[in-house]
Amino acid sequence: MTDLDRYIRQTTFPALGKEGQKKLLASKVLLVGCGALGSASAVSMVRSGIGHLIIVDQDIPELVNLHRQFLYDEENMKERIPKAIVAADKLAKMNSQVKIEPVVAELRSENIEKIAQGVNLVIDGTDNLQTRYLINDFCVKNNVPWIYGGVIGAFGMMMVIIPGKTACLRCLFPEPPAPGSLPSCETEGVLNPAPLLIAALEVMEAIKILIGSDKVKTGLTNIDLWEHTFSTVETKRNPHCPACGQNKYEFLDRKKTDWSTSLCGRNAVQLSPAEPVQLDLQSLKQRLEKIGKVSFNGYLLEADLEGLKIIIFPDGRAIISGTTDETKARSFYNRYLGR
């Protein structure tokens, strides 16, 4: 058997063919986040024969992940091994031709240049808005295509971003919304067919990009599986866009970073955002009340969620009690405040 024999059901498809498969095998892709979207995308990419896959994720599998994050099982949850490591181990058994590189880290301005060096494409599997803006800055600056994807409830969206040709993320959304102002999986839920479908769209467009197809779908695709609706909104580059219009890479060049420290003797971690924000704690209270005990005294918000207590101040500062693990505390903070 040759290296291409295992892909014969793909190479028979005329638009791909053997030459397209060879291009896939020579490609290097960065997957940021290996949760619901990321795990589904990773399986599809590895089985498709994308030659080098870098997986960046800082989290560990938890029970509440298992209904939608298809690479993990109950044993992984008990072992508390990082998702990137678990994913790499399982994916390696699916296709030994693919080099899989796990990176257990939070993607940040300090490490993205090193992690993403030489990649042909970046795929969004994260649920972190700040990380998406960072990816957008890096990709626009370095002329690297990337694919944005997001899922909540039964709704999903996807957009291909090709620097210099299509609108970038900041063309559509010039500034990230305030933390806690958007719905999240924690407050709105998510049904697992949604990330499966969005991941399928992401990987299909990834294949087209990597083989140089002229059939890449641009625009913002929106899908509501519950209502069975599917639409694509055409997007245009904004000449005044801070990133692709003015070459200002604020998220990539940002020197200040979020700060965290364990509070000695308190079994708690304090987190502070890089820049102060003004939170609407009353609105955040209403959102979090769906899933836990929450109180707000006009000055700060306190919530009991997942066995941890979080105290949130109007400027975005938070104290998370019940752990001294700064990575766990940061992940918890990101989930509920969308940072």
Image (spheres, rainbow, N blue to C red):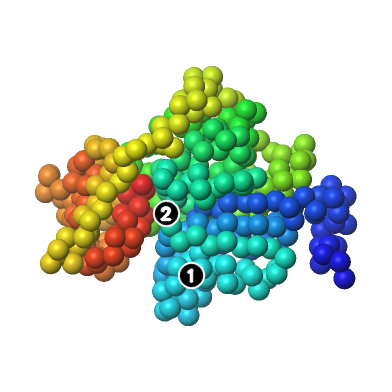
Callout 2 touching callout 1 (CB < 8 Å): no
On screen, residue 193 above or below 90: above
Q: Quadrant of the N terminus?
A: bottom right
C-alpha separation, residue under disc 2 versus residue under disc 1: 21 Å
Residue for point 74% across, 56% down: 25
> For mark 2, what is the residue?
106
Label 2: how many Cα within 10 Å (few below 14, some 14–19, many 20+): some
Depth check: 134 or 173 in front? 134
- Under mark 2, the amino acid is Glu
> For mark 1, what is the residue?
66
Mark 2 secondary-structure assignment: loop
Q: Would residue 40 be seen by someone viewing this image from the given angle?
A: no
Quarter occupied by residue 78: bottom left
Mark 1 secondary-structure assignment: loop
Residue for point 66% across, 35% down: 218
* Front disc: 2 or 1: 2
Image position of 325 (left or right of 105): left
**Circle number at residue 297:** none
- Under mark 1, the amino acid is Leu
x then y, percent, for residue 250: 41, 32
Residue for point 24% across, 65% down: 324
x then y, percent, for residue 17: 86, 52
On screen, residue 298 above or below 331: above
x then y, percent, for residue 26: 73, 52
On screen, residue 296 above or below 239: below
As drawn, the residue found furthest toward the top would be: 239
Residue for point 30% across, 46% down: 258
Quarter occupied by residue 327: bottom left
